[in-house]
Image (spheres, helix red, strand yellow):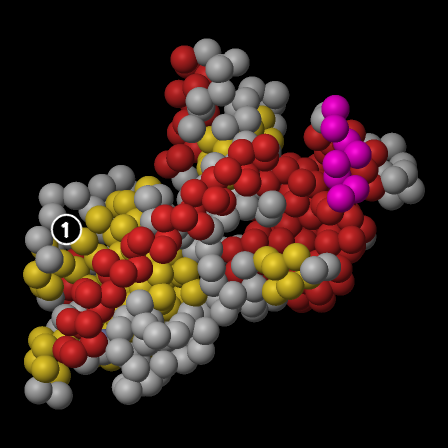
Amino acid sequence: MTGTAERMAGAWLWKAAVPLALPVLAALTLLIPLAVLAAAATPTASASSACSSAGTGATVAGIELDAVQMGQAQTIVTVGAVRGLDSYAATVALATAWQESRLRMLANDGSSPDLTPEQAAETATSLTHPHDGLGSDHDSVNTFQQRWIAGWGTVAQLMDPVYAADAFYSRLVDVPDWEAIPLTRAAQAVQVSAYGDAYARGETLARQLTAMLWPAAQGAAADPAGAVASVCPALPVPAGGWARPTTGQLTSGFGLRWGSQHAGVDFAGPRDTPVYAAAAGTVITAACTSTYCDRDGSLHLEGYGNLVELDHGAGVTTRYAHLSGYTVAPGRQVPAGALLGFQGATGNSTGVHLHFEVRVHGAPVDPVPWLADRGVDLPATATAG
Ligand SMILES: [Zn+2]
């Protein structure tokens, strides 16, 4: 983006912060009955996901699902196909995950009063794994709300979307006549839930999602190397470490460009390439900072487009601009390598890329030496991480 847009974007951040507060609060209130405390406020209708074989967020059975939810759904369906199960198994799994988590990978802060301090601490380790929401129901975690205390696996295992789906199917196929009994009874048998009828509410959605996602799942199953490609990935980054924020060619460096200051570096990859947190931090901005972000911008449009900004403490912030959509909300803590959004061309942009900035006390620094000092070689054409 140009220097003008960079300066404009600073002003936009203040405007963006205020209207965001109310929808976030509203979302919190609505979700408390689900014991889900975060993650719903992602106004990214245009978001689509390269990590979902389905490709995009979608409205299914009248329900608007964002790219993260579609990515989780695709993972669940794909794991079923890789196991060689009938597509109906995926429908049962999707209806269950919809009821339990609204198809989000939920960490758990261990705040449930029925946990001992030791159990609470172990449950809270889920926060150190990639997640796209927060729950607090007993020791339950992940899309299926599986419980480590009940023997479903370790917290680390349960926070892996592939493991979680696989664990669900392992128990489903042990349910007598699971293919013939009502969906809600099969789900209830797996989940050992007293509220089994609730699973029926997601049945229409689950059937339509299965119809949409099963072909790609079969394709992945036929090519084992591609089987996990549909998982919305988060990068494994050591604690305190830094990561390359996205894949793609480094197309523009820091400094003077076209007579103005380029405050960051640009990476150009395919549209909707995942963008990750370069380091652990707190989301301070996740907003459209241009006049519109529902379609590609241009050099005549000012602002960063869809922008995510992270605060890493000690005056260090990072910015991720021109995103096609974002998957985080302000106030959220994210680990290094967490999925933030997807490469796009919103705002002051001529083509699909990520504009990435590192700032120290507000002043932009060159991300190349900054990251090199932290073990990340940006100019190398490498995978994210
Ligand atoms: Zn740029």
- Taking depth in this image into account, of 8 and 141 the one nearest to the observer is 8
Q: Is residue 256 left or right of residue 21?
A: left
Q: Is residue 265 left or right of residue 177?
A: left
The quarter of the picture showing ligand 1: bottom left
Q: Quadrant of the C terminus?
A: bottom left
Query: Callout 1: 10 Å neighbours few (<14), some, many (20+)?
Result: some
Q: Percent position (x, y) of residue 350?
A: 31, 85
Q: Which residue is mark 1?
A: 316
- Taking depth in this image into account, of 21 and 253 the one nearest to the observer is 21
Q: Is residue 255 left or right of residue 37?
A: left
Amino acid type of the residue that numbered disc 1 sits on in the rendered structure? Val
- Residue 213, picture quadrant: bottom right
Asked if residue 76 is among those painted magenta in the image, a careful observer would answer: no
Tally the marks.
Answer: 1
Q: In the image, which residues are magenta?
A: 194-201
Q: Percent position (x, y) of residue 376?
A: 21, 58
Q: Secondary structure at mark 1?
A: strand
Residue 172 visible? The answer is no
Q: Quadrant of the N terminus?
A: bottom left
Compared with 349, 234 (above or below) is above
- Residue 138, picture quadrant: top right
**Residue at image point 52% right, 43% down:** 105
Residue 170 visible? The answer is yes
Q: Percent position (x, y) of residue 208?
A: 75, 59
**Residue at image point 18% right, 53% down:** 317
**Residue at image point 19% right, 65% down:** 11
**Residue at image point 36% right, 81% down:** 297
Compared with 311, 350 (above or below) is below
Q: Percent position (x, y) of residue 182?
A: 87, 40
